Image (tube, grey):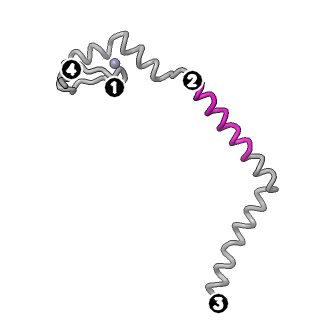
């Protein structure tokens, strides 16, 4: 498999090889490359992305509901603060 310029001059954005650095630099300034860069920076949202985002928001909502159901942050704080106590007791014993 022979690559132009031995594969040294490669545009990642366009997945294209160029014969030398000059060709690569010319390509960097070309319309094709700039359009490609823009596409990479602003990817079109696919149906999969939308569904993933929806799934994430659903998860976040259920999590916040669970946190509210458990009562308050005070409960979890008390539990965590009481946790070290048994350890200290066992150490004394
Ligand atoms: Zn390019």
How much space separates mark 4 and mark 2, taking CA atoms? 35 Å
Answer yes or no: disc 3 within 8 Å of ligand 1.
Answer: no
User: Which mark sits nearer the N-terminus, 3 or 2?
Assistant: 2
Q: Position of residue 77 (x, y in %)?
A: 73, 63
Crowd tier of the residue under label 2, counting other residues whose Cα lies within 10 Å: few below 14, some 14–19, many 20 or above = few
> Closer to the observer: label 1 or label 3?
1
How much space separates mark 3 and mark 2, taking CA atoms? 61 Å
Left or right side of 71 for 81? left
Magenta segment = 45-63
Q: Position of residue 1 (x, y in %)?
A: 19, 25
Residue 52 highlighted magenta (yes or no): yes
Residue linked to disc 2 = 46
Residue linked to disc 1 = 12
User: Which mark sits nearer the N-terminus, 4 or 3?
Assistant: 4
Answer yes or no: disc 1 within 8 Å of ligand 1.
Answer: yes
Proximity of marks 1 and 4: CB atoms separated by less than 8 Å: no
């Amino acid at each position: 498999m022979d690559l132009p310029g031995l594969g040294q001059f490669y545009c990642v954005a366009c997945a294209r090889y160029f014969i030398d650095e000059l060709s690569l630099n010319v390509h960097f300034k070309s319309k094709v490359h700039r359009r490609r860069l823009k596409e990479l920076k602003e990817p079109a949202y696919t149906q999969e992305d939308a569904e993933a985002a929806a799934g994430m928001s659903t998860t976040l909502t259920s999590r916040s509901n669970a946190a509210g159901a458990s009562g308050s942050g005070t409960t979890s704080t008390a539990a965590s603060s009481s946790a070290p106590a048994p350890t200290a007791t066992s150490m004394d014993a």
